[in-house]
Amino acid sequence: MKEITMSSQFDDLARPYESTVASMAVRKHLEYPSYMEAVGELGGLAVLDLGCGSGVYSRRLRKWGAERVVGVDISEGMLAYARAREAEERIGVEYLARDITNPLEGPDADLDGAFDLVAGVYVSPYAPTVNQLHGLFRTARRALPATGGRFVTYALNPEAATQPGYYSDYDFDLVRAEPSGSRTVPEGAPLRLTVTVPERTFSVIAYRWSRDVQEEAAHDAGFTRLRWIQPHVSEEGLRLHGEAYWKPYLDCPHTLILDCTTGQTGTNP
Ligand SMILES: C[S@@+](CC[C@H](N)C(=O)[O-])C[C@H]1O[C@@H](n2cnc3c(N)ncnc32)[C@H](O)[C@@H]1O
């Protein structure tokens, strides 16, 4: 893959995204602990963080014990922020500019087969076409050794609620970007995700991919065992906010972990 950046809908969102980590209960008390649990021990591993954005998970993965972490993203603004943080904090993360949905043909000496784990937090929802979704999973598979490895990604739950206001208690809203009378959200439908952080409100466009389409992309890329994991709330999250606060979210989470493994057969329910 060659160095590539493009202006993107994320370019001026690095700081607001960083704010979501502290301000959004869903990120803090549900997404983060669930992801940590899913990836498990990282001691000595090499990790590639696809769609690393401002570097939130790249930095975390390194702090959780990964020996080598490489973050890749297409957004100039996100990469500039992530690199500036690295220059200041010296955590030991390398950031590269790549279009991860378009793996180039031919060998990519520095990335091919070089990682034990590929991470991808909220990146598959931003693949606008099935081809690009397949490209994303191929990029992940390509970074792992032929003998095996895992891609642990946060996907948009295709059954997420799209009624305006459903997630407003959680500081975001997810709605159909194109008006429609139908309750069924079609394959690839654009959704508008609007997030409120203390300093501002911002929106991005994501795409709804069914489980079947996501699983097919993973299988096509060579992942043989897939596991969908519903995130859970940490004890601290329950204590701070109470069960009633979390119930509507847990009844219909907007995101699910998709844990893709190579080298074994079978698909978990
Ligand atoms: C919602 S942000 C998530 C950032 C980070 N993983 C996090 O959890 O904070 C999605 C990121 O995916 C990146 N992205 C989207 N499409 C991409 C592509 N084709 N190639 C590389 N990065 C992409 C965006 O630039 C953005 O930084």
Image (cartoon, rainbow, N blue to C red):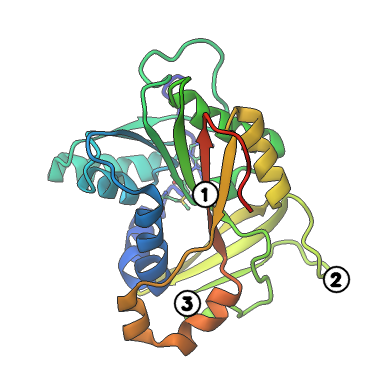
Q: Residue at x 46, y 27 (%)?
A: 148
Question: What is the x, y in percent for residue 93?
Answer: 24, 36
User: In the depicted view, which residue is nearer to us: 155 or 169?
Assistant: 155
Above or below for 41 versus 263: below
Distance Cα–Cα, label 3 vs label 2: 26 Å
First in sequence: mark 1 vs mark 2: 1
Displayed quadrant of residue 51: top left
Residue 250: mark: none
First in sequence: mark 3 vs mark 2: 3
Name the mark nearer the viewer: 1 or 2.
Answer: 2
Q: Residues within 10 Å of mark 1 (few under 14, many from 20)?
A: few
Distance Cα–Cα, label 1 vs label 2: 27 Å
- Residue 9 shows in this picture: yes
Name the mark nearer the viewer: 1 or 3.
Answer: 3
Q: Which residue is mark 1?
A: 9
User: In the depicted view, which residue is nearer to us: 77 or 133?
Assistant: 133
Question: What is the x, y in percent for residue 56?
Answer: 32, 51
Q: Residue at x 35, y 62 (%)?
A: 33
First in sequence: mark 1 vs mark 3: 1
Residue farthest toward the top in the current orientation of the protein? 106
Question: What is the x, y in percent for residue 254?
Answer: 57, 65
Name the mark nearer the viewer: 3 or 2.
Answer: 3
Distance Cα–Cα, label 1 vs label 3: 22 Å
Q: Which residue is mark 3?
A: 170
- Going by the numbered disc 1, the residue's amino acid type is Gln
Label 3 residue SS: helix
Q: Which residue is mark 2?
A: 181
Disc 1 beta carbon < 8 A from ligand 1? yes
